[in-house]
Amino acid sequence: MSTDVLRYPPLPRGAKRLVFLYTMLAAIIGGGFAVTGPLVMALAEGPPGTRLASAVIITVMALVLVILPLGSTAYLLRRGSHAGWIMAIVFGYLMLPLIPILSLIGLEVLVTARSAEVTYFYGRRNRHGQPMLELTDGETTARLLAKCWENFDQPPRELSWWQFWTYLRLKRPPWLRHSPGDDMEHLFRAQEELYRSGEIVWGHVVQANSLLFQPGNIDSPAEVIYSLDDPRGIDPRHLKHVSRQLSALKGRTPHDPQARAIADHLTDEWTRRFGLAVPTELSGPVPMLLSTIFVSRRHLPSAFLCMSLIPLLVSPQPPHFAIPLPSLYWPTELRESWFEAAQQKRVVEALGREWV
């Protein structure tokens, strides 16, 4: 049987032109990504390894958008038949729904890679053998907090889409999706505005989910206290003292209504409070607030809690939402101190002792 019998009639000229224009457009867009992607990553902030990985992934995705449409077009023009038209549809038009899917997968890979790279990049710069930074000195903590302000800038801040979605964004945990009435949802909805206008203050952990004190991959809430009145002049020892007093209220029934509200909240462990006033009998001359925060492990240098004093971003206006300032914007010496504390915590716990 002659092979000519199996050939389809040639495509109409209009169909050829339509497919050709589409594939050229896809190739131009993909080529633009392939050229500008690495350039943008080279100018982006963050560790060099993360920028390189981001550039490579963007380039590969862009080349896929270039090669497949161009290949299908070449096949179409060469065959000039319905078989070529089918190939063009398969490798060209069907790529359309794959583009957002590939973009989401690539973005998720970049988020994970960037978080791991930040932790590794700063972790290997530890000054091993040197004494850990003392965070009980008011001058030291004031200087470190000023450096945090310098690194993250003054509000209102301009955040790029890339900066927010690849590093800053807090991911909703699976358990929150199954708890539609949880007030923690308000914090997630306000996070972008919190990054733009939040005040940077020192916070002290009052209590946290026990999972956060060990390595793992589950993000959880915690309770912190802080002061918006004099954040740079606050004495970290006073924060620690008030934090311990509040912890002692758990499981008790104080007579003071404010203290009782805090005691009930800490005892329940499932409620959320944002900007709950600490009684002056406990806070002293410095007004303090207590808030529920959500701790993202990728925003901590060691990916778990090993120190109680931590920089926070707090909404200046009620409700006072608060989250930890991501460690990428911490001063280098504070990150190093955190890593040293994490190493000491592992050693102490390996010896069967309790980390204090």
Image (cartoon, grey):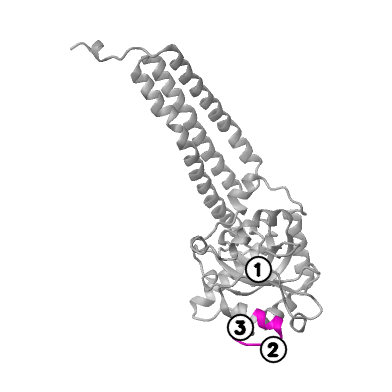
Q: Position of residue 232 (x, y in %)?
A: 79, 67
Distance between the Cα atoms at labels 2 and 3? Answer: 14 Å
Q: Which amino acid, mark 2?
A: His
Q: Is residue 253 part of the magenta span, yes or no?
A: yes
Q: Which residue is mark 3?
A: 250
Residue closest to the far left: 1
Q: Position of residue 4 (x, y in %)?
A: 25, 10
Q: Is residue 76 above or below residue 193?
A: above
* Earlier sequence position, callout 3 versus callout 1: 1
Q: Nearer the viewer, mark 2 or mark 1?
A: 2
Would you identify the image quadrant in which residue 252 lies? bottom right
Q: Which amino acid, mark 3?
A: Lys
Distance between the Cα atoms at labels 3 and 1? Answer: 38 Å
Q: Which class describes the residues within 10 Å of circle 2: few (<14), some (14-19), or many (20+)?
A: few
Q: Secondary structure at mark 2?
A: loop
Q: Which residue is mark 1?
A: 130
Q: Position of residue 131 (x, y in %)?
A: 66, 71
Q: Which of the pair 282/268 is nearer the observer? A: 268
Q: Position of residue 65 (x, y in %)?
A: 49, 31
Q: Which residue is mark 2?
A: 255
Q: Nearer the viewer, mark 3 or mark 1?
A: 3
Residue 289 placement, left or right of 220? right
Q: Magenta residues? A: 250-262
Q: Secondary structure at mark 3?
A: loop
